[in-house]
């Protein structure tokens, strides 16, 4: 079989084990009321910038783009659970986006544009997908999930018979 030349990639925030457990618990509570298909615990993440298919020969260039970022660490308070009607995604989000989160996203986008990478340019709506094919019915009480963001990652995505599988292609610490 010929070697792949491209891979689907995105920059993301990747939860620690502790945050992952809290997210999985929240997704269980939402699933009981809203139904749908739960995101598997090991694939839970929050996308920053979705690049789509990237030539593997440009991976080092992409890592250099990420290494230019000098955003400070911040805390994310996932205190809002909701759904989008158009794509039936159920998600957690922060009611207010910390300025550092937006700096990180817009900074990456600016650097990517300068390096002539293409990416999904739709307005950024911070969200962490917990359920697919779902509909929000009634409000579900949840404890807010506080997540200390100390790094961001570049993830590569492949499709398997069991759904998406992600490989971490790089991780960059935020400034303390
Ligand atoms: P989602 O959770 O709302 O589906 C990997 O596909 C990640 O990239 C998912 O978190 C997905 O968001 C996000 N993403 C953003 N834009 C995308 C796009 N145009 N196509 C597929 N995934 C996208």
Image (cartoon, helix red, strand yellow):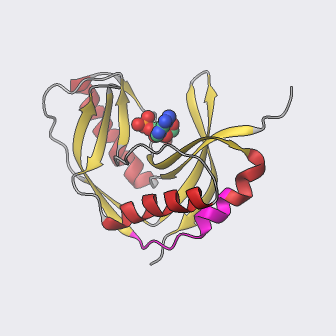
Q: In which quarter of the image is residue 167?
A: top right
Task: Decide if residue 153 is on the left or right side of residue 44.
Answer: right
Q: Nearer the viewer, residue 35 or 61?
A: 61
Check if residue 154 falls in the magenta segment. no
Residue at x 50%, y 74% (from the top left corner): 70
Q: Quadrant of residue 105?
A: bottom left
Residue at x 57%, y 65% (from the top left corner): 172
Residue stretch rendered in magenta on the structure: 62-73
Q: In which quarter of the image is residue 102?
A: bottom left
Task: Decide if residue 130 is on the left or right side of residue 60.
Answer: left
Horizontal and vertical percent position of residue 53:
64, 38
Relative to residue 125, is residue 115 depicted above or below? below
User: Residue lying furthest bottom in this view?
Assistant: 176
Q: Which of 25 and 120 is in front in this view?
A: 120
Q: Which of 95 and 16 is in front in this view?
A: 95
Q: Which of 109 and 20 is in front in this view?
A: 109
Horizontal and vertical percent position of residue 68:
58, 70
Horizontal and vertical percent position of residue 83:
26, 32
Relative to residue 34, is residue 20 depicted above or below? below
The C terminus - image quarter: bottom left
User: Residue lying furthest right in this view?
Assistant: 1
Task: Decide if residue 102 is on the left or right side of residue 40.
Answer: left
Residue at x 71%, y 59% (from the top left corner): 61
Horizontal and vertical percent position of residue 89:
34, 30
The N terminus - image quarter: top right
Task: Decide if residue 159 is on the left or right side of residue 24.
Answer: right
Residue at x 86%, y 29% (from the top left corner): 2
Relative to residue 68, is residue 130 depicted above or below? above
Number of numbered discs overlaid on the protein picture: 0
């Amino acid at each position: 079989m010929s070697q792949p030349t491209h891979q689907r990639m995105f920059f993301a925030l990747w939860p620690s084990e502790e945050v992952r457990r809290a997210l999985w618990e929240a997704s269980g509570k939402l699933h009981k009321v809203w139904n749908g298909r739960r995101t598997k615990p090991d694939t839970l993440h929050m996308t920053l910038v979705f690049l789509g298919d990237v030539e593997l020969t440009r991976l080092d260039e992409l890592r250099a783009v990420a290494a230019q970022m000098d955003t400070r660490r911040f805390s994310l308070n996932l205190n809002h659970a909701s759904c989008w009607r158009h794509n039936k995604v159920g998600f957690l989000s922060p009611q207010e986006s910390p300025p550092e989160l937006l700096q990180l996203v817009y900074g990456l986008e600016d650097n990517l544009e300068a390096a002539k990478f293409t990416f999904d340019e739709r307005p950024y709506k911070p969200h962490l997908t917990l359920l697919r094919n779902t509909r929000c019915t009634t409000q579900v009480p949840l404890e807010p999930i506080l997540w200390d963001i100390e790094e961001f990652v570049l993830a590569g995505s492949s499709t398997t018979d069991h759904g998406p599988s992600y490989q971490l292609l790089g991780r960059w610490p935020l400034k303390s």
